[in-house]
Image (spheres, rainbow, N blue to C red):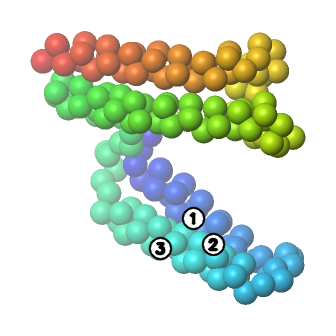
Amino acid sequence: MNKRHYLKIQIAAYSLIVLFILSLPLWAEVKDGEGFLIAGLIALVAGFLAYRSIRQLKATDDTERVYAPPADATPTEQAAYYRRFMYIGLAAFPLLTLITVWDLNDLESGAVESVSVWAPIGFLYEQFGYWAATGSIPLLGLVVVYGLYRKSRSVGMQG
């Protein structure tokens, strides 16, 4: 994806968040001042992020890409790209597993009547039970991380 298009989408999203939050007093009943304070802080953060994206858009070249190694990147740069996402996966999948296990344990113990989980995990839980649902996230993580590892190795060997 072209980085300029990506930044324009980002600016539009942040602007919509700011407009939504600024419109809250028109249609939502907020009974305490804390709600307005939190909404104002969120609007300020979204506004700052939109401003930062606008500044970045001005400095961005038309040929820059987002989240993909450029076609003319060296094999070392491409391997670094895939390794970066592999490390993100190594951190994210165990965290997602812990969150899901925590929620499903609360559901199994009867502490709560319902929980919100990722739709495929909910399907696995309904159809196959607790262990299939909790084991599927680390399994997916292993597949993704192994695929990224293999890709980074194969790209790195080309150089």
Kindly report the distance in space between the C-alpha atoms of the residues bearing marks 2 and 1: 6 Å
Seen at 32% across and 46% down, the residue is 64
Cβ atoms under marks 3 and 2 closer than 8 Å: no
Q: Position of residue 36 (x, y in %)?
A: 70, 82
Closer-to-camera residue (143/155): 143
Sequence-earlier tag: 3 or 1: 1
- From this view, report whether residue 13 is shown above or below residue 45: above
Q: Amino acid at mark 2?
A: Val
Which secondary structure lies at badge 2?
A: helix
Q: Residues within 10 Å of mark 2 (few under 14, many from 20)?
A: many
In the rendered image, the residue lying farthest to the left is: 159
Q: Amino acid at mark 3?
A: Phe
User: Which residue lies under the disc numbered 1?
Assistant: 14
Q: Is residue 95 left or right of residue 55?
A: right
Closer-to-camera residue (155/109): 109
Kindly report the distance in space between the C-alpha atoms of the residues bearing marks 3 and 2: 10 Å
- From this view, report whether residue 45 is shown above or below residue 71: below
Sequence-earlier tag: 3 or 2: 2
Q: Is residue 90 left or right of residue 126?
A: left
Kindly report the distance in space between the C-alpha atoms of the residues bearing marks 3 and 1: 9 Å
User: Which residue lies under the disc numbered 3?
Assistant: 48
Seen at 80% across and 42% down, the residue is 111
Q: Residues within 10 Å of mark 1 (few under 14, many from 20)?
A: many
Dividing the picture into quadrants, the one containing residue 20 is: bottom right
Q: Position of residue 84 (x, y in %)?
A: 31, 34
The numbered disc on residue 18 is 2
Dividing the picture into quadrants, the one containing residue 27 is: bottom right
